Image (cartoon, helix red, strand yellow):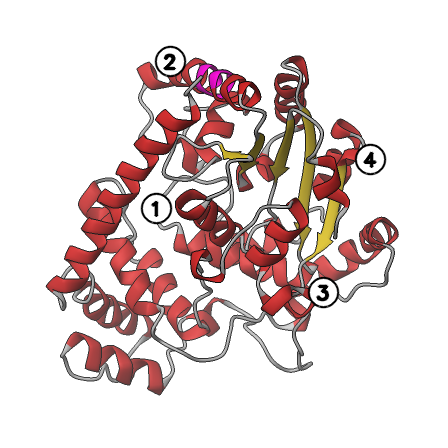
Amino acid sequence: MNELREQNIQPNTCIVHAGMIKTGTTSIQSSLFYNLRSDHFRFLTMDSYFGNLLVGSAFAGDYGIGERFISHGVTAEMAETVPAQSRDYFNRALAAAGAHHRTAILSAEMIGYLRRDGIERLKAFLVDRGWKPRVILYVRAPLDLFESRFQQRLRAGGIPSRIPCKFDDYIKQSSRMSYSEFPRLLDEVFGCENVTFQWFDPQRFPSRCVVRHFCEFAGVPIRDADILRENDSLSLDALRFVYALMLAGRCKVGTRIDRLRHSLLLERLGELRGPSLRFHPELVAPFVERVVPEMAWIESRLGEVLPLSLHPRGNAEGVKCEADLLDFSAESLDWLAKTSGRGVVKPKRSSDMVHAVVDQLESIGLLGSPRRVCRAVLTRAHELLRRASLRSQNLKP
């Protein structure tokens, strides 16, 4: 636990936190973004996706193409200018942190989506400026990662992505996904002596809290009251509703109103409790067959035998096909009727059922509670003010 903390006493250390997805990254970032109170650290960010736009535009090499969420809404002019602006900001922020003998913290799940040349550019950028990168990656159990990645794709709505959101396409692509490629790449580019892997298991964390674990590991002091929990998983029933919206083409995020409506809807769906998304063993069998040999390297790197999943799984349970994602439970339809103030949707043909469910779902976005809308707008305004303040603070010489 003290390894990285001991490294932080060296000047010009940059902690590079690289995910994986659904390992509490947003909670770590939000806690540091709003509540980092130590004068020994600088949390580097300039965008509302924490470090994702900064890292993606500065180092990915394909900013503006439109196949990633970082390219959403990017114009040709932005594609020409933003990468240089991001590198300039990053350069000046590092210089300011170094002048004050601060440890820099860069946290971005986007790092996990960079190709080798992008990661090499990130490392070179740090090293050329005299910084010592210390990388930390929380490693998720492969089956849990397989399912969480699908959930994250659905939650992203209409934002462009190379990850498919149609069920069959997602399963087909992700069954070919390498599990160890990115961790190996981090070792190869940064050197294994500069990379620390942590097995993501809340049972191992202080108070089951990954924010607490990260901060203790990195030597960042934080109070319990300053720890924020963000981006909790949705239940299977809630994800079924999100999938229905996606099929109906109603997950638009093109305008601020679209994004507000989508955010409010996800917030409401978070109230719908129930079992989590699990895929049927037959469905994930090709992925398991592929990933088991890769687990050996991860296990050798972490020094222990690891499970494919942290969750109990039955041999006959789980989502097996798209129809299962549209098999709305009676409890969820009752919840939807009560939340929307309408009658319960009755069983119909599949397409009619989806249409009726989507109509009710759309009524609980901006409608229903003006208080929720006001709170969301004020929260966003607070975030923008904090972002501007932090950006300015990070550049102070």
Judge from the rendering whether residue 327 lies leftward or rightward of residue 314; answer left or right: left
Distance from disc 3 to disc 4, alpha carbons, whole Å, reads: 34 Å
Identify the mark nearer the N-term, 1 or 3.
1
Residue range in magenta is: 87-92
Q: Is residue 43 rendered to the left or right of residue 290? A: left
Q: Which amino acid, mark 3?
A: Ala
Marked residue nearer the N-terminal end (2 or 1):
2
Is the Cβ of the residue at disc 2 closer than 8 Å to that at disc 3?
A: no
Q: Distance between the residues labelled 2 and 3?
A: 45 Å
The residues tagged by marks 1 and 3 sit, at their Cα atoms, a distance apart of 29 Å
**What residue is disc 1 on?**
158
Q: Which of 13 and 198 is in front in this view?
A: 13
Quarter holding the C terminus is top left
Q: In 3D space, how far apart are the residues under numbered discs 2 and 1 (Cα atoms)?
A: 25 Å
Instruction: Say few, some or many: other residues with alpha carbon within 10 Å of mark 1 (under 14 / 14 to 19 / 20 or more).
Output: many
Chief SS of the magenta region? helix
Quarter of image, res 360: bottom left
Res 253 quadrant in image: top left
> Residue placed at 67% from the left, 25% from the top?
11
Q: Nearer the viewer, residue 182 or 87?
A: 87
Q: Which residue is drawn at 68% across and 18% down?
A: 127
**Earlier along the polypeptide chain: callout 2 or callout 3?**
2
Dot 3 and dot 4 residues touching (CB under 8 Å): no
Say which residue label 2 marks.
Answer: 81
Circle 4: is it few (<14), some (14-19), or many (20+) Cα within 10 Å?
Answer: few
Decide which of tag 4 and tag 2 comes sooner along the chain: 2
- The total of numbered circles placed on residues is 4
State the residue position of label 4: 193
Give neighbour class at mark 2: few <14, some 14-19, many 20+ (Cα, 10 Å): few
Is 237 within the magenta? Answer: no
